Amino acid sequence: MTDMPLRTMPDLPWGRTAILMAVLMLAALGGWEVFWRSEGFRPSYRGSDGLWAMQRHLVDRGGRATVTVGSSRTLSDLNLEVWLGETGLRPIQLALEGTNPRPVIHDLAGDPDFTGLLVVGVTPVLFIAPDTGYRAAAIRRYGSESPSQWMGQRLSMPLERVLAFYNFDTALFTVLKRQTWWPVRSGVESGPRPVRKLFNYRITRQADLWLKLDDDPAYAALVQDIWRDFLYAEHEVPPPEVQREQFTQLMDDLRVDVEAIRGRGGEVVFFRAPSGGEFRDVERDAFPREKVWDAIVEGVDAVGVHFEDYPELQGMSLPEWSHMSSRDSPRYTRALVGIIRRQLAARGIERQEFTP
């Protein structure tokens, strides 16, 4: 065997070098933290797959439970602490932004541990959209979380509580992609711009709309302009007969899931959160209420609460047209709980989830 050459370490002050590098690293991290705090960022839990899986595991405890599903409006518009005060029970928040809730409904329909009240938020464009697999990793994480993933989530959370820059929106490459210096290449479709920071998450996965959207008109206008990329983008629309067939299949699948939940003693209710501005205009034109909302609620014979039907659910601040100000969500939640309670009572349905 050939002798390996030996390389001697130079005689340098390694201890002082290590200290210097540690100081420089801490200074860089401190500067990054100061910068993002100056931009209005504050420590917030990350809306990660791991945090979703933690909440999903709460369903496994059985007993009475209220579970909320939907997309980002369900995350932001429902104040879980107010719901707790009104009913004695804090909902388990399983909504996922940018998704339709049907995969989560289906997951709960097949879970014998869930016998409670399922509250489904309906954002029309997302509810009837095909499942793209976006955020599907969260559902998979619940079913097959590895020990390293479990530990990684627990190690991450203490940092999330204290570091403002530890946020998906402040990741270096995410920030670089947003810069205007990148050249626009002809013939290359860039697609809609990525959605900017909207929420601050709590450990319960309640997502409070970032107050910068309330207090900084320029930032709210930026988010509105990004929504326009999505609202007015050209999409290939299937022929009417294909659309009818797809919606019929959607309703057949939804009825099976709702009946499975009811068959175990559970119940399902639906709500339509407010939207405004150009977002509401596009929703009204592209997804007429009678063809989407009414068809869904009537198709599964469920309690449905649409914000347009109740004055107490209107007049909320929607800074970027789609999500409610966290200053108004307590009032909205309190009113919504009261309406759902009355609607269930009118049908002769008594739910222990509404008994403080």
Image (cartoon, rainbow, N blue to C red):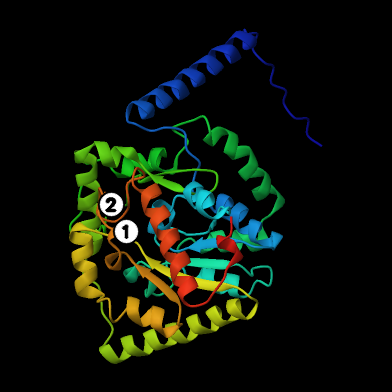
Q: Residue at x 57, y 71 (%)?
A: 350
Q: Secondary structure at mark 1?
A: helix
Tag of residue 316: 2
Q: CA distance from mark 1 to mark 2?
A: 7 Å
Q: Position of residue 339 (x, y in %)?
A: 41, 64
Q: Position of residue 245 (x, y in %)?
A: 37, 90
Q: Is residue 188 visible?
A: no
Q: Secondary structure at mark 2?
A: loop
Looking at the rendered structure, the kind of residue marked 2 is: Met
- Residue placed farthest to the right in the image? 1
Quarter assignment of residue 19: top right
Q: Residue at x 50, y 21 (%)?
A: 25
What residue would you read off at disc 1?
Answer: 313
Q: Position of residue 48 (x, y in %)?
A: 52, 50
Crowding around mark 1 (Cα neighbors within 10 Å: few <14, some 14 to 19, many 20+) is many
Callouts 1 and 2 close, C-beta under 8 Å: yes
Task: State which quarter of the image contains the C terminus.
Answer: bottom right
Q: Is residue 124 above or below residue 299?
A: above
Would residue 13 be found to the left or right of residue 202 on screen?
Answer: right
Task: State which quarter of the image contains the N terminus.
Answer: top right
Q: Position of residue 248 (x, y in %)?
A: 40, 88
Q: Residue at x 45, y 59 (%)?
A: 337
Q: Residue at x 40, y 78 (%)?
A: 297
Q: Is residue 329 above or below residue 10?
A: below
Looking at the rendered structure, the kind of residue marked 1 is: Leu
- 179 and 250: which one is in front? 250
How many numbered badges does the structure rendering display?
Answer: 2
